C-alpha cells in the first residue's frame, strides 16, 4: 500500500512538473510573440507603404487585373475608378522600390490565390540588377505570408549583411527598437487600419512640376542579366497560365527614364509579343497636367492624375484586352460599394486636411 501511494505521489509530481513546463514554455513563446508584434514597424504613420503588401490577403473577391511594381504603380492609378467607370476588378500588389524579382515572387504567390486575366508590370524596376536596401526589402517581404515564394523572395533580395533568420524571426532584427516605440506601436499592436484602396495609396494635395529634369549620364545603359532573367520568368509564368502580360512605364517625370532604356523595352515587348505602353509619351492623350496632377513635383501622381490614368487605361483594358464589366453582379456589387464609400470618405478627409475647397 505504501509503495502504491509512493508511486502515485511520484506520478503526481511528474504530472505537475510536466504541466508547469508546458505553462512555462507557453508563457515564454507568448511573450516572445508579443514582443515581436510590439517591436516590428507598424507602417501606420509616416511610412504607410510598408503596410500595402499585407492588405491583399483581406480581399474576398477575385480580380481580373493585377498590377505589380513599385511606387509608380501604387500611386499612379486608381482601381476604384476602374471599377466605377468600367466595372473592372483590379488590385495593385505594389511596394516601395519593389525590385523585379520581388515582383516576380509576389506574382507567383498571387497566382496560387487567383488567376487574373491580365497582369500589368511597371518596367522602372529593370534599372536594378541586384539588391538595394534592407529597409525597402522589408516593406515588400515582411507583409507576405509564409510560402515557398516568400522564402525565394528573401533569398533573392538579401543584402550581404542580412541574415535569413532575421526574416524568419523578425524579433532578432527589431529587438533594439525599444527607443523608437511610440503610441502607434501600441494602438496597432493587434489590428491595423486600412491604408490603401485595393493597393492604391491616395494623395489629394498638389505640388506642381517646376523646371526640367536634367538627367545624369550613366556609365552603362544596358539592363542587367538578372533583371532580364526575371522579366523572362515573369513572361513565361504569365504565358503558362494563359494570362496576358502588359508592360507599362508610368508617367512619373523622375527617376528619369532614358531613351536607351525605352529602346530596350520596346525591343523586348516586340520580341515576346507583349503590349507595352509608355505613358510618358501619352500624357496628352491621358489628359495629365503636371501643374495639377502630381503631389510631389512629378515623382507620383495625386488623386486627380491617378483617376485620369485609370480612365485612359480602363479603355485599353476594355477594348484591347476584353476585360469584362462586373457591375450589377451580386458577387461584386456589395463588396465594391464598400470600397467606393471608403475611397470617397478618405478623399473628403484629405481635402479637409489640405484645405482643398472645390
Image: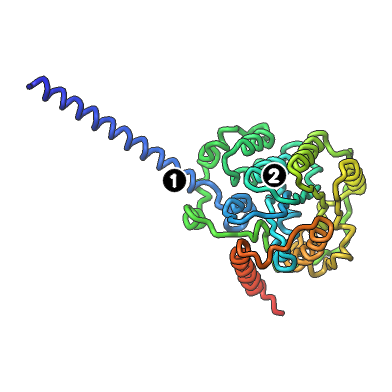
The picture places residue 136, in percent across and down from the top left corner, at: 67, 45
Q: Is residue 50 above or below residue 341?
A: above
Identify the residue under disc 1: 34
Task: Name the residue rendered at 66%, 46% in the picture.
Answer: 110
Task: Report the residue that reaches farthest toward the bottom.
Answer: 358
Q: Is residue 135 at all visible to an observer of this figure?
A: no
Q: Helix, strand or loop at disc 2? A: helix
Task: Name the residue rendered at 82%, 69% in the picture.
Answer: 291
Total marks in image: 2
Closer to viewer: mark 2 or mark 1: 2
* Color theme of the render: rainbow
The reply, left or right, for residue 37 in relation to residue 277 is: left
The reply, left or right, for residue 303 in relation to residue 284 is: left
Identify the residue under disc 2: 107
Query: Crowding near pointer 1: few (<14 within 10 Å), some, many (20+)?
Result: some
The picture places residue 99, in percent across and down from the top left corner, at: 73, 43
Q: Is residue 108 above or below residue 356?
A: above
**Quadrant of the image for the N terminus?**
top left
Q: Which of the 4 image quarters holds residue 209? A: bottom right
- Give the mark, 2 or 1, whose residue is nearer the N terminus: 1
Q: Helix, strand or loop at disc 1? A: helix
Q: Mark 1 and mark 2 in contact (Cβ < 8 Å)?
A: no
Q: Which of the 4 image quarters holds residue 166? A: top right
Q: Is residue 354 above or below residue 77?
A: below
The picture places residue 30, in percent across and down from the top left corner, at: 40, 42
Amino acid at each position: 500500500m505504501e509503495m502504491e501511494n509512493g508511486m502515485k505521489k511520484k506520478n503526481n509530481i511528474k504530472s505537475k512538473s510536466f504541466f508547469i513546463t508546458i505553462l512555462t514554455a507557453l508563457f515564454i513563446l507568448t511573450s516572445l510573440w508579443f514582443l515581436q508584434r510590439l517591436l516590428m514597424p507598424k507602417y501606420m504613420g509616416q511610412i504607410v507603404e510598408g503596410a500595402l503588401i499585407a492588405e491583399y490577403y483581406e480581399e474576398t473577391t477575385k480580380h481580373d487585373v493585377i498590377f505589380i511594381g513599385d511606387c509608380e504603380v501604387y500611386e499612379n492609378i486608381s482601381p476604384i475608378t476602374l471599377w466605377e467607370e468600367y466595372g473592372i476588378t483590379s488590385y495593385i500588389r505594389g511596394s516601395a522600390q519593389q525590385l523585379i524579382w520581388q515582383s516576380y515572387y509576389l506574382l507567383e504567390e498571387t497566382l496560387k490565390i487567383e488567376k487574373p486575366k491580365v497582369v500589368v508590370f511597371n518596367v522602372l524596376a529593370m534599372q536594378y540588377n541586384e539588391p538595394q536596401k534592407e529597409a525597402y526589402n522589408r516593406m515588400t517581404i515582411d507583409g507576405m505570408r509564409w510560402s515557398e515564394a516568400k522564402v525565394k523572395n528573401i533569398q533573392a533580395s538579401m543584402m550581404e549583411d542580412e541574415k535569413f533568420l532575421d526574416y524568419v524571426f523578425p524579433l532578432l532584427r527589431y529587438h533594439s527598437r525599444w527607443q523608437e516605440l511610440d503610441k502607434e506601436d501600441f494602438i496597432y499592436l493587434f489590428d491595423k487600419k486600412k491604408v490603401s484602396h485595393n493597393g492604391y495609396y491616395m494623395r489629394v494635395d498638389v505640388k506642381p512640376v517646376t523646371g526640367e529634369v536634367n538627367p545624369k549620364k550613366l556609365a552603362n545603359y544596358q539592363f542587367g542579366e538578372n533583371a532580364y532573367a526575371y522579366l523572362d520568368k515573369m513572361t513565361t509564368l504569365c504565358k503558362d497560365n494563359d494570362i496576358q502580360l502588359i508592360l507599362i512605364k508610368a508617367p512619373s517625370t523622375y527617376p528619369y527614364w532614358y531613351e536607351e532604356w525605352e529602346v530596350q523595352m520596346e525591343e523586348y515587348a516586340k520580341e515576346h509579343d507583349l503590349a507595352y505602353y509608355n505613358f510618358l509619351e501619352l500624357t496628352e492623350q491621358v489628359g495629365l497636367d503636371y501643374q495639377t496632377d502630381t503631389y510631389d513635383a512629378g515623382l507620383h501622381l495625386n488623386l486627380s492624375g491617378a483617376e485620369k490614368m485609370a480612365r485612359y487605361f480602363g479603355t485599353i483594358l476594355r477594348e484591347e484586352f476584353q476585360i469584362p464589366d462586373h457591375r450589377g453582379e451580386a458577387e461584386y456589387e456589395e463588396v465594391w460599394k464598400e470600397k467606393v464609400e471608403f475611397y470617397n470618405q478618405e478623399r473628403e478627409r484629405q481635402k479637409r486636411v489640405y484645405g482643398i475647397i472645390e
